[in-house]
Image (tube, helix red, strand yellow):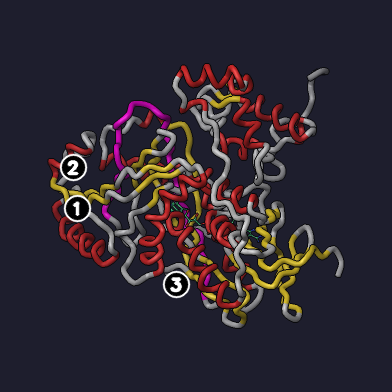
Amino acid sequence: MKNLDSNYDVLVVGAGIVGAFVSRELSKYDLKVGLIEAHNDVGNGCSGANSAIIHSGYDPNPGTLKAKFNALGNPMWDQIADELDIDFTRKGSLTVALYSEQLPLLADLVQRSKKNGVPVRLLNADEVKAMEPNISPKIKAALYAPTAGIIDPFCAVVNTIENAVDNGVELLLNNKVLSIRKENDYFIVKTNKKEYKTKLVINCAGVHSDEIANMIEPIDWKTTPRRGEYFVLDHFMDGFANHTIFPMPSEKGKGILITPTTSNNYLLGPSSELIDDYDDVSTDKPTLDNVKAQVLDMVPGIPLNKVIRVFSGNRPTTTRHDFIIEYAKTDNHFINVAGIESPGFVCAPAIARYVVEDLVRNVYSLKENKNYNSRIRKHIKINKMTYEERVEFIKKNPEYGRIICNCEQVSLGEIKDVLSRNAAPTTVKGIKKRCRAGFGLCQGGFCQSKVVEILADYYNVSPLDVLYDDEGSNILLNIIKEGK
Ligand SMILES: Cc1cc2nc3c(=O)[nH]c(=O)nc-3n(C[C@H](O)[C@H](O)[C@H](O)COP(=O)(O)OP(=O)(O)OC[C@H]3O[C@@H](n4cnc5c(N)ncnc54)[C@H](O)[C@@H]3O)c2cc1C
């Protein structure tokens, strides 16, 4: 066969958080695993555009896969964050009732939490005000869920895939799957680059998972993108919102929230709107105006003059209204892990364990990878060091003393470190996701040109060829003066 790549035992399609954990879980075994991704970097789907909450799990309807995997996934994150060096804090969440007519629903949520096995406490208005001094004076009561957490979603995906690659998984970027066919006992997975041969396919393609599933058989479900738009606030005074603050949930989901992030910013959002274009992550004023109105109702003093960015992500909502984690109807060597909408991030490690230990093990005899290492090399973070620690460290490692991003205090040493790892970035956005250079108040206004230079030097290419993100997103278009 022309241009056919070597045989794989398993090909995982989609390098979001689900494909990341599925690959890492597979790397515990002696298997040849490939992780195929259409983009030039990992985590560029909805795993890089969400609220980054490790949900406690009180909210999903009891008995659903969402409820099951949320309850299993939430407690896994302390160990994962430690092994994979991911910023993670259990801040707790408050679901607030601002109106008397919401109080019965709050009582229902307590019952739902019990059924889901999630610890919660009902708080009266005074208790909520003590925990959240900026909450609306209309507050009547709230449901407190202490096990809810916040996570760095970008490093969660990147570091998990780095670890999977450290353990032998092959990352196949820039490979968009176009078709899949079965030939004898193998699948031939055709991408825009080549054809790959594999015994087993695991479909983790997010909002595109219905297209991938449809490549081998007709399916009776469909994904529809449900867009969520956000504001990002700069980091400023501590304590503005100490917890993730949710409104009362509705049929549209958990609602528009206010949350601190692991980088001490705040997120306001997301909206919830069904759209047609799977990849349309634009934002619009009327939707964002509605986000503003909703969050101001919960916390009237939000300093909206601190907004530094807006963004959106698309949830892969399916016609089944739950996760789809099962063999294809006609072939148990094709596994769909589809429609993983919220709370999919928190669920991903538990879903991956189920997929590998139950579904893959059922069709393969799994032999342990004796060299498996669950940890990645720790990151050096200059902005987390005391002044004295910095001075000592920089004496021995001068590149960590050259600050590239002033807003987020990111040094050349940190950028060079991520470039030297497995699953390394090749774009400006890739550096931003891994080290936060360009995430601050100036949004890359000062550091972006330096990051372009660093990437051009590292990969020995012209700065004109350095991309911000996907193909065609070159930052520099022409040389207008001689010299560098
Ligand atoms: C607005 C919003 C808020 C959310 N908030 C939370 C939250 O707070 N907590 C939580 O737990 N969950 C949250 N979620 C849900 C969570 O983000 C998702 O469940 C999770 O990221 C899904 O991961 P995934 O790997 O399935 O999909 P994705 O991250 O979208 O990854 C799929 C990957 O497949 C690739 N792909 C697609 N088609 C192809 C192809 N043909 N060939 C090759 N590659 C392909 C894509 O490029 C992409 O990289 C939120 C989601 C959204 C959108």
- Residue under numbered circle 2: 128
Dot 1 amino acid type: Arg
Q: Are marks 2 and 3 in contact (CB under 8 Å)?
A: no
Q: Is the CB of the residue bearing disc 2 within 8 angstroms of ligand 1?
A: no
Residue at mark 1 to residue at mark 3: CA–CA distance: 31 Å
Q: Does the image show residue 395?
A: yes
Q: Quadrant of residue 201 in the image?
A: bottom right
Task: Give the mark, 2 or 3, whose residue is nearer the N terminus.
Answer: 2
The three-letter amino acid code for the residue at tag 2 is: Val
Image quarter of residue 297: top left
Pointers 1 and 3 in contact (CB under 8 A)? Answer: no
Apparent side of residue 209 relative to residue 37 in the rendered image (left or right): left
Q: Which residue is mark 3?
A: 320
Q: Which residues are magenta?
A: 221-248
Which label is found at residue 121?
A: 1
**Left or right placement of residue 116 versus residue 449 in this view:** left
Secondary element under disc 2, as helix, strand or loop, is helix
Residue 78 position within the rendered picture, expressed as x and y whole percent measured from the top left: 41, 49
Q: CA distance from mark 1 to mark 2?
A: 11 Å
Q: CA distance from mark 2 to mark 3?
A: 36 Å
The number of callouts visible is 3
Kindly identify the amino acid type of the residue bearing the numbered disc 3: Arg
| In the depicted structure, whether residue 162 falls above or below residue 194 | above
Q: Which secondary structure, mark 3? A: loop
Magenta stretch contains residue 481? no
